[in-house]
Amino acid sequence: MTSLSLAGPDVAAAKTDVLVVGAAKGPKGPVLAAGNAAVDKAFGGRLGRTLGDVGFVGNEDECVRLPAPGDLGASSVVVVGLGDAGNVTAETLRRAAGAGVRAAAGVRRAATTLALHTGVDAGAALRAVAEGALLGAYDFTRFRNASLTGRKGPVQSMVVATNDPKGRAATNAAKRAETVAAATALTRDLVNTPPGDLHPADLADVARTEATKAGCTVDVMDEKALRKGGYGGILGVGQGSANPPRLVRIGYTHPKAKRTIALVGKGVTFDSGGISIKPSASMEAMKSDMAGAASVVAALTAIARLGVKVNVTGWVPTAENMPSGAAIRPGDVLTMYKGKRVEVLNTDAEGRLILGDAITRAGEEKPDMIVDVATLTGAQIVALGMRTSGLMSNDDDLRSRIAAAAEVAGEQLWPMPLPGELRKSIDSDVADIVNTGDRYGGMLVAGVFLREFVPEGMPWAHLDIAGPAFNTNDAWGYTPKGGTGVPVRTFLQLAEDEAAR
Ligand code: BES
Ligand code: MN
Ligand code: ZN
């Protein structure tokens, strides 16, 4: 991973390959961000004008690389757009840091003055820039030979300028950013790993290794244990695959914790649709159908490493959804964990089946709240697009707290309702409920289905990350192509917020 260090505000003089600076979009052309007086001076006080001359406006995600004048410590300068000068937030800086670091790929050392921006709280700015820089330097190289592809590797060391680099606040911010980046990279790696290299048992193994290293306890139920326990949803989804399912429990406790959060993540290692098979184009990204699970595992590692004063239990139901002579058929009825019966009319609505079991199981331990996360419906993408996750809850207060955590963390999600009238669309003619309902509002129907497995009175929230978990478009800001790491940062922030309550 890229290493991070902090330096004082005079970083412009320091020896480096690339210096990343910000420039906003002003009424009369680009406006250099605060903290860049020395850089501008090295350009003869004309950097703003030079930027205008090369057609740079200052829009977000706009990047230009200029050769540096001799009296600057850097060989070149990457200028990143910050958008409208009046609208710069911590998230703007996080994205700019990511875009700048991506533009610097191929060099060894980079430094940035982005955290010296004055419109944003200094602590929040440092945290955001450090995170954005490390997140933008991500690369998934396991299945690639650099000498064959000729791709430029990410920046290896990153220096972030800040006013008090030796202070405790700054040191903590850097440590937190490194932990967040490592957890996000773990999520992205798991999502990007080909489905043939990450069967349910492999996902469980990674969960065990990584969570144990971070100081959590891990228990894995194999198919035999699942059968004995009556986990019909997880077993049903997994029964068409040669690679049997698992249920993982990850435990993190803090001696001074007052509250317990249960996180439940969908871990479908590959979703072919099963007998209700998907068209092949819709299958291309379905190695990402375990992104919820990956984010839960990674969030637990981060929470444990940072010693957050809260208890968190992670639940990862994981299965491979495949068609075969042994697979569940449309019309089959599954007996879920604790007995509810579900008529499976569409084997492609499999995520809710494994989550139903896991949510019931999580509820048995009586946590203070259950939050599940899943690449659950194509309808999420129709409703909210590729970057905004859907947030549903049976508890207004919990919904607000999660939305607030996401806002601070810089992850996009938006509240969605769970309309009561949709409930009758999952009535079954032969069983207790069906796994598919109204075609319209498909994201909400899935939420209404999951609610059936939440214990009476238990605050619960559901995050549908179908689009945001996997970027099929070009890289932008600190978000690469492929696995994004959503919503690890929101989970960590939520845990910290709950600890402080
Ligand atoms: N894993 C998919 C949802 C998905 C779609 C995730 C696109 C990421 C990108 C899920 O299991 C699924 O197939 N859902 C169906 C539900 C339907 C059969 C009720 C869907 O959305 O079409
Ligand atoms: Mn499916
Ligand atoms: Zn799925």
Image: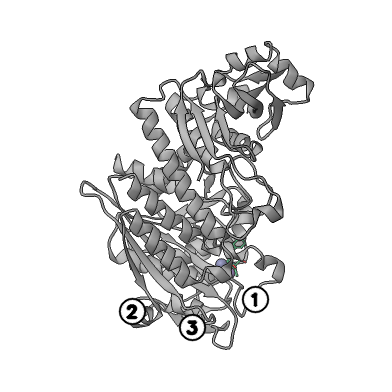
Dot 2 alpha-carbon crowd within 10 angstroms: few under 14, some 14 to 19, many 20 or more: few
Q: Where is residue 251 in the image (x, y as percent from the top left)?
A: 31, 59
User: Is 176 drawn above or below residue 336 in the view shown?
Assistant: above
Mark nearer the N terminus (1 vs 3)? 1
The CB of the residue at mark 3 lies under 8 Å from ligand 1? no
Left or right: residue 414 versus residue 440 is: left
Q: Position of residue 470 (x, y in %)?
A: 60, 55
Residue 467 visible: yes
| Residue at mark 2 to residue at mark 3: CA–CA distance | 18 Å
Q: Which amino acid does label 3 sit on?
A: Val
Q: Residue 229 carries which label?
A: 2
Q: In which quarter of the image is ligand 1?
A: bottom right
Q: Residue at x 53, y 46 (%)?
A: 414
Left or right: residue 67 versus residue 169 is: right
Q: Residue at x 50, y 79 (%)?
A: 343
Element type where label 3 sits in the image: strand
Nearest to viewer (mark 2 / mark 3): 2
Q: What residue type is labelled 1?
A: Ile
Q: Residue furthest front?
A: 147
Q: Residue furthest bottom?
A: 325
> Which residue is under mark 1?
277
Q: Where is residue 113 in the image (x, y as percent from the top left)?
A: 55, 24
Between 461 and 213, the one lying in front of the other is 213
Q: What residue type is labelled 2?
A: Gly
Mark nearer the N terminus (1 vs 2)? 2
| Residue at mark 1 to residue at mark 2: CA–CA distance | 29 Å
Q: Residue 333 carries which label?
A: 3
